[in-house]
């Protein structure tokens, strides 16, 4: 078993995925032929996000964790007119690569990338500005970043959080988890318990990719 679902189900679902075009396709191909090991959202998560964004029609999106800009560029296709994406990335190599990709795709006017640690950048962002927050960074930080995600989301906005099941290990007893992974395991459980029990949110945990949490701010 890999990730959460059985391989054959994942393979079947991925075969249904329509490949993107342009710079997004180039990034997918570089990863597929193992020329690059860039971390990007899984195809089934990309498809899920496309549906959510089509329904939600966001004007302002915040992303925490840009990597090479793949998901930011994907999400930009679903922005309302004059919409903007702000994405945060702390690793210089990723920041530089994302900046180049966004420029090559001609999306500099739609995507603003901020180089820095989200722990600091988040404190500078306006309250209730964003229609969608996509959190896809260090999993151990999710519980710490959650109060900011809730603060910057407008009522009616959605928080999408990726990789919340950590290869399915989050659903296992902590005693079955490698000692080095126990802190992440505890923090992810804390995060999932909080989003599903906070009165300000309605949340659902979906076992696709490495686990996606979807939270609606009431
Ligand atoms: C899984 S990748 C993001 C993938 C990207 N969203 C995509 O699908 O194309 C996670 C990224 O988050 C960045 N990151 C991790 N912790 C961060 C933090 N505290 N602040 C800013 N960036 C962070 C990492 O450097 C990495 O590039």
Image: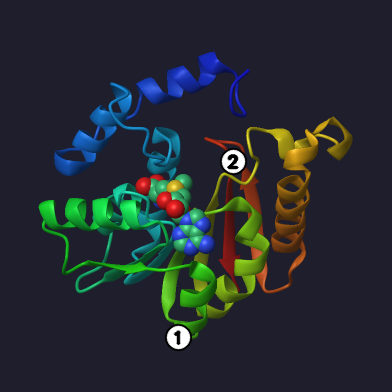
Snapshot quadrant of residue 129: bottom left
Residue 98 higher or lower than 121, as above or below: above
* Residue at mark 2: 211
* Residue at x 65%, y 54% (from the top left corner): 140
For the question of whether residue 135 can be seen, the reply is: no
Q: Which of 174 and 195 is in front in this view?
A: 174
Looking at the picture, how far across and down is residue 207, in whole percent? 61, 37
Q: Which colour scheme is used?
A: rainbow
For this orientation, the residue located farthest to the front is 92
* Residue at mark 1: 126
34 to the left or right of 5:
left
Looking at the picture, how far across and down is residue 213, in whole percent? 59, 51
In what element is the residue under mark 2?
loop
Looking at the picture, how far across and down is residue 8, in whole percent? 52, 14
* Residue at x 80%, y 38% (from the top left corner): 179
Snapshot quadrant of residue 35: top left
Snapshot quadrant of residue 185: top right
Q: If you read the primary sequence from the N terminus, does the residue marked by circle 1 or circle 2 appear first?
A: 1
* Residue at x 45%, y 18% (from the top left corner): 11
* Residue at x 42%, y 41% (from the top left corner): 41
Q: Nearer the viewer, residue 183 or 111?
A: 183
Where's the N terminus, which quadrant? top right
In what element is the residue under mark 1?
loop
> Which of the labelled discs sits on residue 56, or is there none?
none
Residue 112 higher or lower than 53, as above or below: below
162 to the left or right of 175:
left
């Amino acid at each position: 078993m890999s990730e959460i679902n059985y391989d054959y189900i994942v393979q079947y679902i991925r075969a249904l995925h329509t490949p993107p075009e342009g710079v997004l396709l180039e990034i997918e191909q570089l990863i597929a032929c193992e020329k690059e090991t860039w971390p990007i959202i899984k195809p089934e998560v990309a498809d899920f996000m496309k549906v959510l964004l089509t329904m939600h029609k966001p004007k302002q999106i915040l992303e925490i964790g840009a990597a090479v800009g793949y998901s930011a560029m994907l999400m930009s296709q679903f922005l309302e007119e004059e919409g903007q994406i702000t994405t945060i990335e702390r690793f210089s190599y990723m920041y530089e690569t994302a900046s180049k990709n966004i420029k090559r795709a001609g999306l500099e006017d739609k995507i603003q990338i901020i180089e820095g640690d989200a722990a600091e950048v988040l404190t500078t962002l306006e309250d209730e500005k964003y229609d969608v927050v996509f959190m896809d960074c260090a999993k151990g930080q999710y519980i710490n970043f959650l109060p900011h995600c809730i603060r910057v989301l407008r009522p009616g906005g959605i928080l999408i959080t990726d990789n919340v099941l950590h290869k399915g290990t989050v659903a296992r007893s902590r005693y079955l988890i490698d000692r080095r992974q126990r802190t992440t395991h505890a923090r992810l459980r804390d995060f999932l318990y909080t989003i599903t029990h906070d009165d300000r949110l309605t949340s659902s945990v979906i076992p696709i990719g490495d686990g996606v949490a979807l939270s609606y701010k009431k």
